[in-house]
Amino acid sequence: MEFFIDTGDIEEIKESYSWGVIDGVTTNPSLVAKTGVDQKTLIKNIAEIVDGPISAEVISTDSEGMLKEAYDLAKIHDNVVIKLPMTIEGMKACHRLSADKIKTNVTLIFSANQALLAAKNGATYVSPFIGRLDDIGQTGNYLIQEIRTVFDNYGMETKILAASIRHTDHVKASALMGSDVATIPFKVLKQLFHHPLTVSGLEQFLADHAKSQK
Ligand code: E4P
């Protein structure tokens, strides 16, 4: 399973990348807006740190506009993945980018049918938003399971990228449901390393070692 970090914050990317577990980065317009840096500069800066897929989202709502943005973004670095919204216009752009061998990540996926449509159009990744489904009283994890079943039924190669992850249980559930990738915010990523029994166990080992040296 691959882990991407879900942020535009360069310091978070640098630190988490040094932990060795990060395979790529996802951004979205809200995350880019928080950085105060323009999208192209940000993606260029990320590509200097991370050797792996970097999702950059288009903001046009028509396929021609999306394609224009996509070709510009794809020029920044070979690792750029074009993030497109799950709309008919987004799917038109996805179809074209797949034909041009440009990698895509179809975002704002909330149903297995939407994931199926994106896969039929050759999307490299689909991003089901599990946290936002939980927010409206549904169970986002089940969506990962449904998409896994659908893709496996037809041998579809599109990767499932679990997104909108809010806590460590989302990461575990995504892994159990067979997600190919989870994109994880920095805070949650850091929490994955923690267990209170690891902390107390290590304290005990160090205390015993210190006693044995006296
Ligand atoms: C990443 O690709 C998504 O844009 C992101 O995970 C959405 O997360 P949110 O629902 O917490 O905004």
Image (cartoon, rainbow, N blue to C red):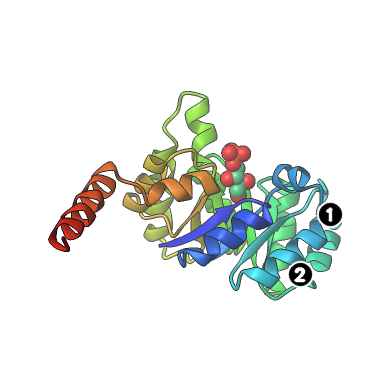
Give the labeled residue for mark 1: 38
Q: Which disc, if any, is residue 139?
A: none
Q: Quadrant of ligand 1?
A: top right
Task: Name the residue rendered at 81%, 47% in the picture.
Answer: 36
Does the Cβ of the disc 2 residue fall within 8 Å of ligand 1? no
Amino acid under label 2? Ala
- Quarter containing the C terminus: bottom left
Cα–Cα gap, marks 2 and 1: 16 Å
Considering the numbered disc 2 on the image, is that residue within a helix, a strand or a loop?
Answer: helix
Residue 27, x across and y down, in percent: 67, 52
Residue 144, x across and y down, in percent: 42, 46
Decide if residue 108 is in sight here. Answer: no
User: How many C-alpha atoms fall within 10 Å of the one at disc 1: few (<14), some, or many (≥20)?
Assistant: few
Task: Name the residue rendered at 47%, 50% in the picture.
Answer: 189
User: How many C-alpha atoms fall within 10 Å of the one at disc 2: few (<14), some, or many (≥20)?
Assistant: some
Q: Is residue 205 above or below residue 102?
A: above
Task: Name the residue rendered at 60%, 67% in the picture.
Answer: 53
Q: Nearer the viewer, residue 194 or 109?
A: 194
Amino acid under label 1? Asp
Left or right: where 45 falls relative to 68: left
- Residue lying farthest to the front in this orientation: 214
Q: Nearer the viewer, mark 2 or mark 1?
A: 1
Q: Earlier in the sequence, mark 2 or mark 1?
A: 1
Task: Name the residue rendered at 51%, 62% in the picture.
Answer: 158
Does the Cβ of the disc 1 residue fall within 8 Å of ligand 1? no
- Residue 178, by quadrant, is bottom left
Considering the numbered disc 1 on the image, is that residue within a helix, a strand or a loop?
Answer: loop
